[in-house]
Amino acid sequence: MRKRLAPYFLLLPGGIWMLAFFVIPLVFMASVSLMTGNIIDGFKQTWHWNNYIDGFSTYKEYYVRSLWYGLLATVLCIALAYPAAYWIAFKSGRHKSTYLFLLLLPFFVSFVLRTVSWKLVLTDNGPILGPLKDWGLLPQDFHVLDSAIAVVTGLTYNYLPFMVLPIYVALEKIDFRIVEASYDLYSSRAATFSKVVFPLSLPGVFAGVIMTFVPVSSDYVNSEVLGGPKNTMIGHIIRQEYFENSAYAVSSALSFSLMAILLIGIFIYARALGTEDVLEAAGR
């Protein structure tokens, strides 16, 4: 009897933690999203579903912009993370831990401070644009801040490790003898990568996209620090409605709408990629 119950007892602390700090707050937020009222007169449970309809229709463009920025940043993260993870996994020898530590080292600094640092780097007369303007390579009125480029750049930088680490773990699990066998069978490097290495690393790419796209799409710090009024993301709107306007019901409804959109997007992505193929590759 004790042996049967042992796994459940081991799961109990984590289950209680998830119940207390995830499930209960989520249920409470769902209840708040259907309320009406204000902070002065109080809020009442009226099952007001129009909070969702009105919120989405009012802020639809911010949802679209957030998903678009999230997609761009995720694609850039893959383009930057895969070569780095590949090199660390196959070419760095016994210094893998050192390179991973160096990759993660900047992220011991506060998220906000790193984003503000990017603002100093990308300023009009900063260390990058200033010399380029002085040398005549860029016009004097050229600027990057308050643009989508700055926001996507900040998002890519801040969430890059979430893509590198899963891909590295997947590549690290590949038996390099399989790659060598492909070369022995007169396969080119490009064919070996496309038919052997990349399919075996798909679990890492799959995990990395989920771990990157979800927080990137809901981020608001980068758009607030590096962007302008035309670059506002839905995360900023949710924060504004909750903390500045005290519109708790609206902000809760916006949060659940964003959650639903992201879940639908992840489901479509999983179906398109083929979760069975990913799991099969992970089990090899």
Image (spheres, rainbow, N blue to C red):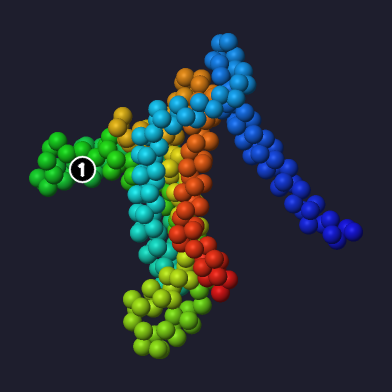
Q: Residue furthest right?
A: 1
Residue 73 screen position, x and y as percent: 37, 49
Check disc 1: other Cα within 10 Å, few if <14, some if 14-19, many if 20+. many
Q: Quadrant of residue 134?
A: top left
> Left or right of 168: which side holds 142?
left
Residue depicted at x 51% and y 40%: 259
Instruction: Name which residue type carries label 1.
Output: Leu
Give the camera-side residue of 24 and 115.
24
Give the camera-side residue of 226 and 215.
215
Give the camera-side residue of 168 and 98.
168
Which type of secondary structure does the marked residue at label 1 adopt? helix
Residue 176 screen position, x and y as percent: 48, 79
Image quadrant where one finds the N terminus? bottom right
Residue depicted at x 55% and y 16%: 37
Residue depicted at x 56% and y 24%: 48
Residue 114 screen position, x and y as percent: 40, 41
- Answer whether residue 191 is visible to the viewer in this image: yes
- Answer whether residue 118 is visible to the viewer in this image: no
Image quadrant where one finds the C terminus? bottom right
Residue placed under numbered mark 1 in the picture? 129
Residue 199 screen position, x and y as percent: 45, 70
Residue depicted at x 56% and y 11%: 40
Image: 32 above or below 142: above
Image: 227 above or below 13: above
